Image: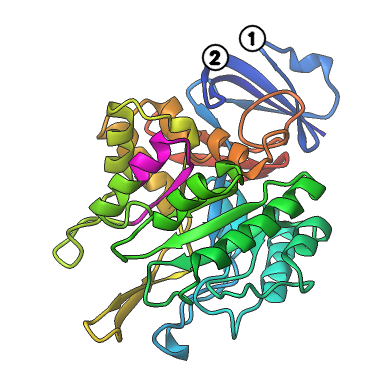
Amino acid sequence: MFTLLKEASIYSPDFLGKKDILFCFDKIAAIKNSMDPSALDDVEVLDCSNKLIFPGFIDLHVHIAGGGGEGGFSTRTPSAKADEILKTGVTTVVGVLGADGVTRSVENLYAQAKQLEAGGLSTYMYTGSYQVPVVTLTGSIQKDIVFVDKIIGVGELCLEDHRAFQPTFDEIARIAAQTRNGALISGKAGLVHFHMGLGETGLEYLFRMMNETLIPVSHFLPTHVNRTGMLFEQACSYLQKGGYIDLTAGFIPSKEDPDCVASYDALKKLVDTGADIGRVTMSSDAYGSVPVFDGLGNVISSDTVTTKILFDELKVAIKEKGIPIETAISLVTKNAAGVLKIHKQKGSLETGKDADCVICDKDLNIETVFAKGIKYS
């Protein structure tokens, strides 16, 4: 019934100092300087005197039902498993379809979200896929957002990529308007989540949405913005003008891909230039494929990653790039909860919120994860 974490160094993600945290069932019941466990019945006490505690991580772009397939059926990736995700510190995921909206469906994605929820995760999802017009669950973007509990927006819509359905600006604007309408009625985030490819015009549609429509920029979240140096520069400008951006873990400059920007280098630049980090998130793109194409558009190799990459790269940001822990962790906690409009229950360690937390040693190795008060080691 009760779990008491004693003398932990707490990052909410803002640093709160050494305190005790009390969980009651699936909620945070109290955070105080000191609490006496003898005053409680049926309490498990954990000595956290040499530990760091963070809110549970939120990964807002995960191919929970698997992804890939650009190289044929043999390149399809497997679906996610709850225990594998939880051990990486991720306690909340947002499921997304990608290039394959044919052999995988919104129905399939919803069922997988429910399965992961039964395994201990908190789950949400986007309706649609790369495809335009958007294929939905109910036949309507608005109805999906209003009536389907887990659907918080549309995505990932593919732009500036040879896999895109080449939508016009007007088509994207109408999708955004329908999403905005569904968000207003339901009280949900109503995100339009964009996959950004290698195309030279980059974020042009997003700047036009900002300048030519009245739809608030909080409804738009482009991801993979560190895919190239040029795209990242555009993303910095978009952020400066009030937009929101999502960095993707896993883009590591190499001989084959010299122009991408690692998430930790991107974050370092944003911090050094005084950007508003509160509108920056980071996701893993886990369980989707990472295809490499030749000059003719044929897949020559394909790989995949898990949600582990998210904290791995945040640790590089903290340990090697000098990013403050509070800043780095905010991308996958407070910031993500804010853009998803789930901040009332997720994203920070506060009384009344879900008992989701990650317990690490001083070297930032994950030791224990709590998801809604249940302990996973």
Give me the C-alpha separation between circle 2 and circle 1.
7 Å
> Taking 78 as reference, is 344 above or below it?
above
- Residue 20: give its label: none
Q: Give the secondary structure at mark 1.
A: loop
Q: Residue furthest top?
A: 33
Instruction: Say which residue label 1 marks.
Output: 33
Residue 294 locus on image (x, y percent) = 23, 82
Residue 75 lies in what quarter of the image? bottom left
33 on left or right of 188 = left
Instruction: Say which residue label 2 marks.
Output: 18
Residue 250 locus on image (x, y percent) = 34, 56
Residue 106 lies in what quarter of the image? bottom right
Residue at figure coordinates x 67%, y 51% from the top left: 190
> Taking 94 as reference, is 216 above or below it?
above
Residue 31 lies in what quarter of the image? top right
> Taking 372 as reference, is 38 above or below it?
above
Q: Residue furthest left?
A: 255
Q: Residue furthest front?
A: 212
Q: Are marks 2 and 1 in contact (CB under 8 Å)?
A: yes
Magenta segment range? 235-250
Sequence order check: which comes first, mark 2 or mark 1?
Answer: 2
Residue at figure coordinates x 46%, y 52% from the top left: 208
Amino acid type, mark 2: Lys
Amino acid type, mark 1: Asn
Depth check, front residue: 334 or 161: 161
Residue 283 locus on image (x, y percent) = 47, 51
Quadrant for the N terminus in the image: top right
Residue 248 locus on image (x, y percent) = 40, 53
Query: Is residue 242 rendered magenta in the image?
Result: yes
Depth check, front residue: 83 or 98: 98
Query: Is residue 45 rendered magenta in the image?
Result: no
Q: Give the secondary structure at mark 2.
A: strand
